[in-house]
Amino acid sequence: MTTTMQRPAALRKPPAPPKRRKRWMPWLYLAPALGLLITFTYVPVGNMVYYSFTSWDGLDATMDPVGLDNYVRVFTDERYWRVFLVSGYYFVASFAQIAIALYFAVILSFHTRFRNLFKGILFFPYLLNGVAVGFVFLYLFQPGGTLDTVLGWAGLGEHTRYWLGDPDIANISLAGTSVWRFTGLSFVLFLGAIQSIPSEIYEAAEIDGAGDWHKFRHIIVPGIRRIISLSFILAISGSLSVFDIPFIMTGGANGTRTFVVQAYETAFQFRQIGLASAMAVVLLLVVLFVTWIQRRIVPDEEVTLS
């Protein structure tokens, strides 16, 4: 016959109170996401910053520290800082991209014939791979290509040029390609924001006699202000980090080399990982600085339409 000794009820450990258990539950759910974020974002960035203070070629087991020499070279060697000016073409083109996307988003947010067809047409380029877009426009801009043929049919054959071979116009051609590709992304952002505005506000404005321009200025623009701010941030960061379009279409020739293309060639063609890491750190700081200025000019305030 066996007997079991039971612990007196007064000596048992009381269960954790509900509030105490709820305190660490959010961290339990966040742990996987935080682990992935730290592993694949912050750790590589930390390694990149460390490499930027070395003269590592990417192959040797040892890294020779060089202090700030890589950063001094980025800011004093014309080959590295001058390519930043090329980003100005894409920066200006990003304003045209936002204006075109906002125009079509406003038009197609209301009752328009075949609007679903036009939505698909506008968003389709963004679904294409950057390599595919580069090859498509490479054939479009080549001498005697599609663009020259269309100009010839329209009686404008004398305006044909070396669209990618002339340094005066090559960056404009590439920036136009970038606008064609990314207008769909801005369009979808604007379209979703505009359609989230309650229809009762438009009806009340119509009763008060507001026209289309007044509805756009006093209802749509305040209602999508955050999306406009987000679009500008994406446009700024995108214009400073352009890579695939110029790399595929021209390889950086004819004055089309961007800062990222220059960093890629420095890292993988000239085996200067330390210097390329310093260029990447400079690019990151510039994007953060420009974004900070943009946020100061257009603060993210609570917007109400009432």
Image (spheres, rainbow, N blue to C red):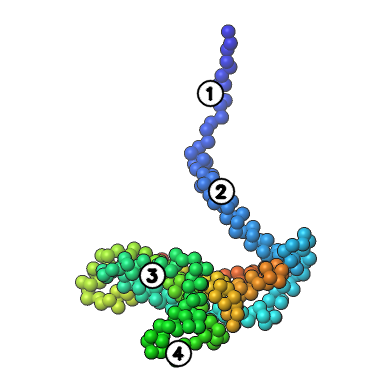
Residues packed near mark 1 inside 10 Å, few (<14), some (14 to 19) or many (20 plus): few
Instruction: Residue under label 2, please give it.
Output: 31
**Of the residues shown, which amino acid type is indicated by label 4?**
His
Front residue of 106 and 126: 126
Front residue of 57 and 35: 57
Dot placed on the residue nearer the N-terminal end, 1 or 4? 1
The N terminus, quarter of image: top right
Instruction: Residue under label 3, please give it.
Output: 122
Q: Quadrant of residue 218?
A: bottom left
**Of the residues shown, which amino acid type is indicated by label 1?**
Ala
**Of the residues shown, which amino acid type is indicated by label 3?**
Leu
Label 4 to label 3: alpha-carbon separation: 28 Å
Label 2 to label 1: alpha-carbon separation: 36 Å
Q: Nearer the viewer, mark 2 or mark 4?
A: 4
In the rendering, which numbered label is found on residue 9? 1
Answer left or right for 63 relative to 114. Answer: right
Q: Nearer the viewer, mark 4 or mark 3?
A: 4
